[in-house]
Image (tube, helix red, strand yellow):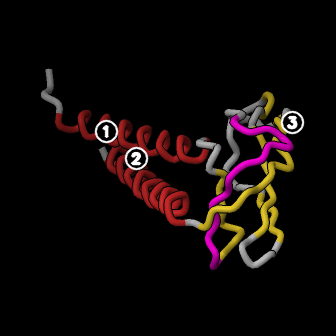
Amino acid sequence: MGWLVLLTAAFASLAVFEVRNLRALLRLRRNGTRVPGTVVSAERSNRVVRTSERPGVDKTIDIAFRFETVDGRAVEVRPKIKSAVRTVHTGQHVTVAYDPANPEYADILDSKGAVWLHAGAIAFSVVVCASCVWTVVRPGP
């Protein structure tokens, strides 16, 4: 029973963490300074992963984009979150929202990959927590 409580706590913590990340991202998308940008790299990694936990091919997409801040500073961003869905391509002109206090914190408005990743992590965490709680409170045979 103790492991179930720990599992529930871990996934509840993950859900809270992802809700905070999603809120910050949506705030950036809503309130960030919008400027035109260009995708400088959108390449599938296709690197072979040789680990005992997950052998195979990593098929995530590395994206990098470049834009110029309102004050004329050139910034290139390579988001930490990789996507498995290709929504942009190299050379594409995009709209970028960035935080003027920290221009490296930016997102491509034409791409929804990061939003869906956070939303999916929240949904998964809630399902795991609900399953753990149901396991504890369900009527027995």
Three-letter code for the amino acid on which mark 1 is drawn:
Cys
**Residue bounds of the magenta highlight:** 87-101
Please give the label number shown on residue 7: 2
- Say if 87 sits above or below 122 in the image: above
Please give the label number shown on residue 132: 1
Three-letter code for the amino acid on which mark 3 is drawn:
Arg
Contact, CB < 8 Å: mark 2 with mark 1? yes
Q: Residue 3 appears at what percent x and percent y?
A: 38, 46
Q: Can the viewer see residue 79?
A: yes
| Mark 3, other Cα within 10 Å: few <14 / some 14–19 / many ≥20 | few
What is the spatial separation of the Cα atoms under label 2 and label 3, in whole angstroms? 32 Å
Three-letter code for the amino acid on which mark 2 is drawn:
Leu
Horizontal placement of 102 versus 50: left or right? left
Which picture quadrant has residue 71?
A: bottom right
- Residue at the spot x=86%, y=44% of the render? 91
Q: Secondary structure at mark 3?
A: strand
- Residue at the spot x=61%, y=67% of the render? 33
